[in-house]
Amino acid sequence: MGGVFVDDCRLSKMLEKYQQNSGRRLWDAKHENLSAEIDRVKKENDNMQIELRHLKGEDLNSLNPKELIPIEEALQNGLSNVRDKQMDFLKMLKKNERLLEEENKRLSYILQHHQQLAMNGNVREMELGYHQKDRDFHHSQMPMAFRVQPIQPNLQQDKQ
């Protein structure tokens, strides 16, 4: 970057000499203001780069205690903000956990209710099936000795 600065200075001097010798004005007030603004922005950028290095913990040896105090305050504020964000995140996680637990309880209750209904239904079906089988047994599965046989002609009577 030093080479660019040297070239800018040489260029500026050459342009000044040209203006003086030719009598023509190359830089008007608008360009002068723009050049000053560019210089101001460059200086501000350099200062921000230095401040950033200080906030990263670099180049602190050259600073005196008065210059370290604002850096320490900025770091403490940043740390406080990070802790606040962490607490907000933890609160959100706990809230989500509580909501999930409530949803789990609700779904468990519904599942138990449905299982109870299903079991009650199965018990009724089993009872109905048992009674039906009991009736079927009485009517169709009686032992042979108790069955009424239709009247058949006696074979011996036919021989007579």
Image (cartoon, helix red, strand yellow):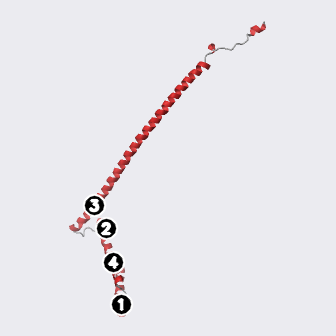
Q: Which mark is residue 77?
A: 3
The N terminus, quarter of image: bottom left
Which residue carries the number 2 mark?
52
Q: For the residue carrying disc 4, how many other residues have a C-alpha within 10 Å: few (<14), some (14-19), or many (20+)?
A: few
- The local secondary structure at tag 4 comes to helix
Q: Residue at x 56, y 21 (%)?
A: 134
How far apart are labels 3 and 1 at the CA level? 53 Å
Q: For the residue carrying disc 3, how many other residues have a C-alpha within 10 Å: few (<14), some (14-19), or many (20+)?
A: few
Q: Name the mark nearer the viewer: 2 or 1.
A: 1
Q: Which amino acid, mark 2? A: Leu
Q: Earlier in the sequence, mark 2 or mark 4?
A: 4
The image position of residue 94, as x and y in percent, is 35, 48
Q: Residue 84: name its quadrant.
A: bottom left
Q: Residue 33: name its quadrant.
A: bottom left
Q: Earlier in the sequence, mark 1 or mark 4?
A: 1
Q: Which mark is residue 37?
A: 4
